[in-house]
Image (spheres, coloured by chain):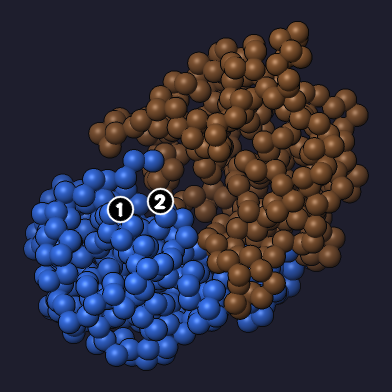
Chain colours: A blue, B brown
């Protein structure tokens, strides 16, 4: 049972018009190497579900996206994601804007095989007005109306973990796993890139198994890519690359996405990319943010 | 104290801390440096029962400093509190968040999502609704406004209504306004709440040197005024010391443009107090 594939092979699972979910949060632990591979692919018309950062910005800018399901898209220290902003302000993409918690409920509904989860979140706000596909339901137990958050079924989930073995056991060392477990469970195919590929023996040591948040049968493909979250962080291995994000953000108002993609993505493999951003040693030396 | 003694940022922080007084064991979340400093100040002084996170993934028994921390600094972690668990807390209602909306309307509805009348093609894309819809219908919220102006306090409904307020047109079936809990609004001019007739925004106190006319002039809708309109209380020496200790790099001085003084009365008048 060997689930290890190259980034190219893994991303080949993604077809036009699929719905993909991306783990991580803003500038933190995003599967960016897989995103770069997706940028190099011919895939288009994706629906993207994410707690978004540069993953969403890049895919929008590169014309891969038909629709974004989001609660925010932000780089944290650069609050407004420059390319998502451009895509929105030029009307280039469709969106479904929902509350952060609604997204969690939608992923859980998909993971649990139920059509929706009732909630009061969103009631009284424009989330209801702007998402006519989201319906209200009556409760058999009270006289209130409830928002029926529909299942967010994913064709593919892309996640970056600290470590994995070839059987699909994934470990997240970071203090927060975000909603990665729910993205993984909501997806038909879960692709996990990891900073380190380890033997299964690793999970038998100490309490390593305690930081495995979903079972191996939830993961279909493992892609070992040291530094694969760059320029986002993979706490505690490395922080996010503020200088790189600044250059990325600046490119939106100067040369545009083509120049950024030419420099970092197009016709470049991950090794070539990493050599442009300080190599794996430089990435692993990026300081963690302090809040 | 004289007007040199405290900054407007410190005055606003102390006024914002008051929003958390008597809240008990709720998660106090201040978004932005001054609201976070305010919640921390409240926890360190009059409401020690408050709960707080490190703004990442741990609950703390003692608030972290809001500036000057290093990665290696220890913190008083008392439990894990990743994002998914934050929602368990939000949905339980045991939280009071202080947030800084870009727009606030007369109903207490707010906007951090996008500006402009065409949602499909907004004039300015901002953050997105984030957790505002859930926060507003699940737990207490206060607003922190560093630039009290007609652009923030808008005449019509917000361009994108991100949080539920006291708009009868939008009240969901079976719900009552008793389930909506919008607390204080702390601005650079005054302190307000939603305690006017029919939840009208109401001025509680004016910052020293600010007139009621100035407040109304900078608000696009009509304000109520509490009967015993007060002057916002100046920070005490103890509060000044705690703020300095929680913010050793003095980041609070960089939050408001030109770091204005807190007491903006003419010099003679303030000296005679």
Instruction: Identify the residue at horizontal 83%, vertical 42% (top origin).
Output: B216
Q: Position of residue B72 (x, y in %)?
A: 25, 34
The residue where tag 1 is placed is: A242
Q: Is residue B273 above or below residue A104?
A: above
Q: Position of residue B5 (x, y in %)?
A: 59, 16
B146 with respect to A83 (left or right): right
Quadrant in which the N terminus of chain A appears: bottom left
B184 with respect to B106 (left or right): left
Instruction: Identify the residue at horizontal 53%, vertical 61% (top origin).
Output: B127
Q: Is residue A189 above or below residue B260?
A: below
Mark 2 falls within which chain? A
Instruction: Identify the residue at horizontal 32%, vertical 45% (top origin).
Output: A289
| Circles 2 and 1 on the same subunit | yes
Instruction: Identify the residue at horizontal 69%, vertical 72% (top origin).
Output: B117
User: For this rendering, which residue is in front, A6 or B157?
Assistant: B157
Q: Secondary structure at mark 2?
A: loop
Labelled disc at residue A77: 2
Q: Position of residue A205 (x, y in %)?
A: 12, 51
A256 with respect to B17 (left or right): left
Q: Position of residue B91 (x, y in %)?
A: 59, 53
């Amino acid at each position: 049972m060997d689930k290890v594939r190259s980034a190219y092979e893994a991303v080949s699972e993604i077809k036009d018009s699929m719905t993909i979910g991306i783990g991580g949060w803003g500038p933190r632990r995003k599967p960016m190497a897989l995103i770069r591979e997706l940028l190099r692919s011919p895939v288009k018309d994706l629906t993207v579900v994410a707690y978004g950062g540069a993953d969403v910005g890049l895919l929008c800018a590169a014309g891969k996206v038909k629709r974004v399901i989001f609660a925010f898209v932000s780089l944290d220290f650069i609050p407004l994601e420059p390319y998502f902003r451009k895509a929105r302000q030029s009307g280039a993409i469709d969106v479904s804007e929902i509350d952060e918690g609604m997204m969690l409920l939608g992923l859980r509904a998909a993971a649990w095989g139920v059509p929706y989860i009732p909630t009061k979140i969103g009631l009284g706000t424009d989330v209801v007005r702007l998402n006519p596909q989201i319906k209200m339901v009556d409760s058999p137990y009270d006289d209130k109306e409830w928002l029926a958050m529909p299942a967010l079924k994913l064709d593919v989930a892309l996640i970056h973990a600290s470590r994995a073995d070839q059987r699909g056991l994934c470990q997240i060392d970071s203090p927060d796993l975000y909603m990665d477990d729910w993205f993984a469970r909501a997806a038909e195919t879960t692709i996990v890139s990891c900073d380190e590929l380890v033997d299964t023996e690793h999970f038998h040591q100490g309490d390593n198994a305690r930081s495995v948040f979903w079972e191996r049968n939830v993961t279909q493909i493992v892609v070992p890519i040291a530094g694969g979250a760059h320029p986002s962080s993979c706490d505690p291995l490395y922080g996010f690359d503020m200088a790189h994000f600044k250059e990325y953000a600046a490119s939106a108002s100067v040369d545009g996405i083509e120049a950024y993609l030419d420099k970092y993505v197009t016709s470049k493999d991950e090794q070539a990319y990493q050599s442009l951003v300080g190599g794996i040693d430089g990435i692993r030396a990026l300081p963690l943010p302090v809040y | 104290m004289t007007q040199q003694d405290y900054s407007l940022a410190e005055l606003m922080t102390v006024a914002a801390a008051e929003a958390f007084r008597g809240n008990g064991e709720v998660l106090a979340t201040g978004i932005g440096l001054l609201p976070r400093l305010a919640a921390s100040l409240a926890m360190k002084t009059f409401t020690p029962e408050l709960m707080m996170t490190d703004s990442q993934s741990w609950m703390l028994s003692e608030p972290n400093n809001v500036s000057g921390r290093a990665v290696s600094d220890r913190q008083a972690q008392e439990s894990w509190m990743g994002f998914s668990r934050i929602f368990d807390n939000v949905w339980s209602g045991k939280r009071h968040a202080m947030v800084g909306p870009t727009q606030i309307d007369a109903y207490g509805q707010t906007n951090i999502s996008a500006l402009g009348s065409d949602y499909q093609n907004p004039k300015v894309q901002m953050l997105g609704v984030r957790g505002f819809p859930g926060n507003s219908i699940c737990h207490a919220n206060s607003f922190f406004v560093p630039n009290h102006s007609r652009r923030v306090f808008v005449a019509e409904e917000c361009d994108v209504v991100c949080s539920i307020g006291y708009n009868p047109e939008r009240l969901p079936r079976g719900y009552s306004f008793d389930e909506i809990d919008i607390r204080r609004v702390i601005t650079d001019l005054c302190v307000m709440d939603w305690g006017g007739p029919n939840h009208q925004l109401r001025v509680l106190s004016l910052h020293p040197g600010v007139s009621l006319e100035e407040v109304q002039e900078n608000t696009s809708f009509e304000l109520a005024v509490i009967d015993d309109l007060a002057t916002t209380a100046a920070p005490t020496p103890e509060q000044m010391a705690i703020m300095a200790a929680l913010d050793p790099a003095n980041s609070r001085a960089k939050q408001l443009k030109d770091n204005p003084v807190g007491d903006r009365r003419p010099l003679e008048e303030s000296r005679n107090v």
